[in-house]
Image: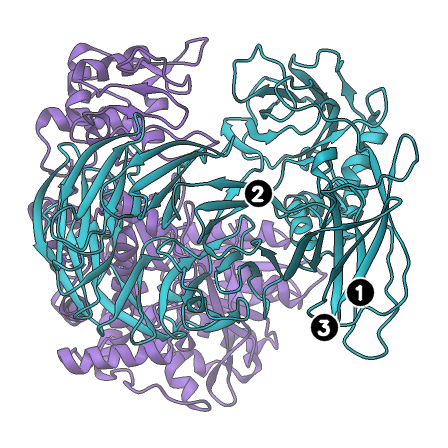
Chain colours: A cyan, B purple
Amino acid sequence: MWSISFARTIPRCVPTATRLRLILKPTVICLLQLAASLAQVHARQESVGQPRAPQRYTREGVTVEFTVEPVASGTAAELLDGTEATVRFKITDGAGKALGNLRPAAWIDRRDKAEAPDARECREKVQSFLQASLSRRPDIDLNTYFILTLNHEPNISVIDPLSGFSTTKLYTLVALPGPGEDWLMSRDKKRLYVSMPHAGQVAVVDTATWKVLANVAAGAMPTRLALQHDEKYLWVGNDNAEETNSGVTVIDTTTLKVAAQLDTGAGRHEIAFTDDDRHAFVTNRRSGTLSVVDVRRLATVKEIKVGALPSALAYSTLGQAVYVANEGDGTIAAVSGSGHEVVARMKAQPGLYALRFMPGGRFGFVVNRAANAVYIFDVSTNRLVQTVPVGPSPDQITFTKDFAYVRSTGSEFVTMIKIGGLDTGGEVAVNRFPAGQRAPRDSSFTSVAASVIPAPEAGAVLVANPADKTIYYYMEGMAAPMGSFQNYRRDPRAVLVLDKSLRETAPGVYETTARLDGHGQYDVAFLLDAPRMVNCFGMTVKENPALPKTIGIPIKVETLAQGGTLRVGESYSLRFKVTDIISNQPKADLRDMGVLVFLAPGIWQRRELAKPLGDGVYEMSFVPPQAGVYYVHFQSPSLGVKYNQLPFFTLRAAQDDDAPQPKATQP
Amino acid sequence: MTWTLNFIRICLENPPPRERRQEGRQTWNIWSHLIRRVLFIFLSATLAPCPAVLARAPSPRSELTPQERRGKQIYLRGVSTSGREILAYLGDASLEVPGSTMACVNCHALDGRGKPEGGITPSNISWEALSKPYGVTHPGGRKHPPYTERALELAVTRGLDPAGNKLLNVMPRYQMAREDMADLVAYLKRLGTDSDPGVTEGRLVIGTVVPSRSDLAGIGQAIKAVTAAYFAEVNERGGIYNRKLELKSIETADTARATSANVSRFLQDEEVFALTGAFIAGADKELAALMGDSETPLVGPLTLYPQVGHPLNRHVFYLLSGVYEQTRALVNFASEQSPGQKTSVLLVYPEGELTAGVLEAVRDQCRKSGCDPPREYGYQSGRFDAVDSAKKLSATGTKSVVFFLGTGEEALALMKEADKLSWSPQLYLPGAAAGNKILDAPPSFSRKIFLSFPTSPADQTAEGVAEYRALAAKHNLPANHVATQLSALGAAKILVEGLKRAGREVSREKLIETLEGLNGYATGVTPPVTYGPNRRIGALGAYVVTVDLEKREFVPAGPWVKVNF
């Protein structure tokens, strides 16, 4: 009984932990299941001597081969502190046959003892990671993902949602020459392309190093991005208001050079391709046309009058036709993919703004931002089958397996349309949930890129609300989002997910990349649910001569109890003492003693330098804006101490007169 | 035969009610109507029981050249039409296997785009993808310039791409004659662009088969009328992916063999893509075999004898359970009646080819349901001795149940004799065999007679009935043979749903794949249908109905009984 239920639950176990961590609740269920599964592990482990040679672990005929190598240089190089490494597990059966379609999980954790952990210690380690407690986190979780936000500032936030509150969730910030408008991830997830209309460029970002590889000049107002299926060319819409220089720029993704620039017509452009990449279709909003481009020759071969203000298009694999939604006359035109003729026309209301096909491709969804509705049409018959009322000024639509999500710029509510019963002819059910407090259009920074995207866990989405400066995590079936991630005072115009968990890149080979932080000995804990395998491999990270020397954290911080209450709206002075950890003497007169105070879960924050009062005592003041729990972090750049390196404190503020005494607790 | 014709006359004279009646006494009408309908098909099926030699269908015509067609054969089957050997060498060890075990289509699919399997995504080998002027960069990083014909040969024979890179070793290397290689390359350049017969830019030809006999003309009329009416509705709404459905029909002949020849010619001459709602009773085996040979999908044939044995005929999708499957459902039902104890089954049957299959079904299902092996009492067809049988059977004891595979009249005679011996066992018979005369059975058999039906009036939903009525009114459909019309309509709806799911680039194979994906699809006029790679009966199972002899009505004996093979 156990083995069956375990096999089913563990793959979900890790994401469950992820989800629960988002709302800071430990999970016991996974732990219990794991304990049951770990009860009888008898395994053979081969030597972990050579740090860079492949390490193997065999149990019941199944072998896991572990390798780790630097991303940057060849296999001969050492693993260095502060660099990216590729972690790879190759899983084979007794006959050497690759075992595909498995869901392994792995963690990298600093070894706290001289010798490698034995089987029991390793099991305990894995157990503690699955438990999702705040006290015991691995240094690197290889089962996680990054959330990327396209900001109103010229940068992209890379957020690691799994980091606890003891460290900042902002993994890194990618600086761009200009604010991004649209973006796309390559299929292998190694590259991120970002259009920057005001910079006239497209940035190419390496997602392993988060460095900008190139800024490619891409004509006037480069806005919409589209990648061909074979990813040979990146197509950029040049949304120039003039007739000239308005069209598409085609960038060769191998050379990152412009392969062609075509003036297709005036106005905003949307781009789609046939399945075989033979032709590209480009809408020209002001011209009211659809341009057909021969991809082999990179030349326009036909211009088709499709209607007034074509504003969206999508290619239907089932129908072998491209569907164009015209905002001006409210029609949807179907243009055959081979003959390039209008083969059908459906009549809806003016205001059509977005068009997408649901998974499977049978039904198209068209968003009308004027009529606040979504039309559903059947590609097999080219007929509208249903009209669904949605929130005010809808402009985007995204699908998960079971739902269509419609973002309304005029409301904080996201509309959900259940798509399950469509092919049996049933009426769709409509629901909604609030993604934040404010309507997205309260921010002036919405973009054409998707603001609602499926989360890596099935049945969940992430919603970027620029007005709230927050990303919300919503799970299907709930009345409200389960959690949120703050975007550090930046308006998130769009959101993307970069799944960093182990992916099967070749039969039986599961790999991902991770950034190694800090030199020393590490254990790489590996877990496979079926067949059950738990093992800790070894890994050595060398000191990086290129990095500034980091020494141990040289100071400790204690808060000093003081009178007065922590009341909402009233200034509160926080005093603390800094001591040199080696000499145990007060560390006075630090000019850069920074304090970060934020209100959980990151709704409000304040960063300030503390005032030295002498004898190692410092003070900073802040006014708590609302009741709740405040986290206090400290840093001193001159001593090389970052916010996430020192223990944090918590403070509670209350609204009432009977507010509790300020309580500083050491975690 | 006179009896059959009389029965048909009754059917014609008593058209089934157009309106669906409500509860109560009206149940009788509905069930008895059902009995008539099913009985009718059952009798038709016995009209031509003689086995016929399979008529071999010529290969379907397509736009391919003869060379391309030969190449297609290699692509699909891994064998040469010339009979020359084709060998495949597998893996690093170059294990030699016949080409037929490693046909290209297995991994690369019909359209050449590949079916991902076991973590491997086969390359897209459509000529459009291979010949891109800028070459191809594969997800793993492998790059090569565009393919030429010569490069294609090297990939097939040596496992090298145009850049000289080794292909993944899951791609076998093939050895074949130069002529065969030329044929294969010629077809590979057409891969994904050739279409099956009956598919053109603007239309899709669908066929049906109707009975030729003048006394069954009404049935044929009904099938044609309802299918044409439904297609007209579909076409009026824009067709399917901008193609209009065109219905063509062919009549059966006097013998199964001649029918098969007729249909074969019809498929070829009219370029029929698929068949729907065909009347195949009497030529069940022959037409099913023809569908397999000509690779023509057939949806919802009207028959009581679905051909679903091994090897599976992939091309025929039946709507309802036939006599075999219904009898299995009856056995399941009977063994559930007395849980915990083994049911003792007495099997009474007329000897003959048709009942042989039913006997086998009862024996097999008995094994699965845990009843004792049935005790069998065969009699010569048409010479049932009710007195003697009643005597013999009653001697077996009171706990046994009787499965009766003869006619309704014979069953009635048996019950009357048994009643005289004060013996009234549970009597199971396929609903198709019972007639309304079963209501004249002795009262001691009240609620002891159990009949199986592949469908029930309750399967028709309000929307389904409304849709049919609208169709009937608009297209002036015949007022009789409503049950047949509903079956044909159900078949057409399943076909259309399959076509809608298959997309504009439809092929017979794609249609079969999408039909296999139907799960609980509600036609509204039949039970919901489910098919699968190994399942060809849409509503697999039966309703069991008992007879209340005091009130003279048919009463459902329980919920739908599923059949597991």
Q: Secondary structure at mark 1?
A: strand
Mark in front: 2 vs 1:
1
Q: Is residue B305 depicted above or below B114 in this figure?
A: below
Q: Secondary structure at mark 3?
A: loop
Q: Residues within 10 Å of mark 2 (few under 14, many from 20)?
A: some
Residue sitting at the far right: A584
Name which residue lies at 60% across and 17% down: A95
Q: Amino acid at mark 3?
A: Gly
Name which residue lies at 28% across and 13% down: B163
The spot of residue B166 in percent (x, y) is 36, 13
The spot of residue A388 in percent (x, y) is 36, 74
- A369 with respect to B199 (left or right): right
The residue at which mark 3 appears reads as A569
Q: Amino acid at mark 2?
A: Tyr
Q: Nearer the viewer, residue B381 or B447?
A: B447
Q: Is residue A120 depicted above or below A289 in this figure?
A: above
Q: Residues within 10 Å of mark 1 (few under 14, many from 20)?
A: many
